Amino acid sequence: MHEQPSTPTIPPASRPKKPLDTVVKLALMVFFGSFALIWGGMYLSRPDRSIPPYSIGSQEGTAVAVHVPPWTSDPEIEPLIERFRKVGRETRNFGPMKIRPTTPDDPQGRYRRMTIYIFTHDAWAEGDILHRYLGGEDKEIREGFEKALRGLYRIDEREAEGRIGPLVEGRDSVATAAYSRRLFKDTIDPGS
């Protein structure tokens, strides 16, 4: 019998690796690069978690109705009011907070006067309800609006005020402090 010479077989682990094709390398770079861009964009555009998520329900003149989620508690609404206060003190530019200018034709500023009403039920932040409340003719709407209110921020040329809870008649008292109270009332320097 005749034996054929055997060719040496190289074990699979010691075979030289074939380099990746240029197209495959490019495809892998695009694949992983896109994930890096998506992650970076999500990181840079992440929402501010120090205040509750909110949306502008409607705006009429100097009045703005804001809606926060129904589960938002009073202690969670307070930082939002404080953020409005900070912007009012520092720049008076509420544009980055999604609010259109309330006094666009005023040469002294686009946000000279403003009242922000904060609600947890989005129906109260609708334009029709805000319009009817500001008109003051419908007593039921006015009472319901003021009772449904969860927070308020008001600013004008002289002062800024922040409140938590519904609007109540008369002065704040110990009895109303459990559900409605003033957070601050600041005097504004006329030079600012």
Image: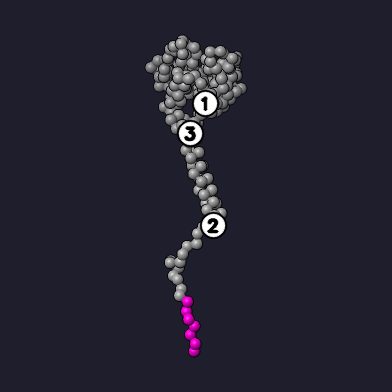
Q: Does the magenta segment cover residue 96? A: no
User: Residue at label 3?
Assistant: 47
Mark toward the start of the polypeptide (1 vs 2): 2
Looking at the rendering, the stretch of residues picked out in magenta corresponds to: 1-7
**Residue 103 placement (x, y as % from top left):** 56, 16
Colouring scheme, one of rainbow, by chain, secondary structure, one colour: one colour
Distance of label 1 from label 3 (alpha carbons):
13 Å
Identify the mark at residue 88; answer none if there is no mark.
none
Residue type at the position of mark 2? Asp
Instruction: Tell me whether circle 1 and circle 3 mark residues in contact (CB < 8 Å).
Output: no
Given residues 87 and 135, the one toward you in this image is 87
Residue type at the position of mark 3? Pro
User: Residue at label 2?
Assistant: 21
Residue type at the position of mark 1? Pro
Given residues 105 and 47, the one toward you in this image is 105
Identify the mark at residue 96; answer none if there is no mark.
1
Distance of label 1 from label 2 (alpha carbons):
48 Å
Which quarter of the picture shows residue 185? top left
Dominant SS in magenta: loop
Residue farthest to the bottom?
A: 1
Residue at x-position 52% and y-position 49%: 29
Residue at x-position 44% and y-position 70%: 11
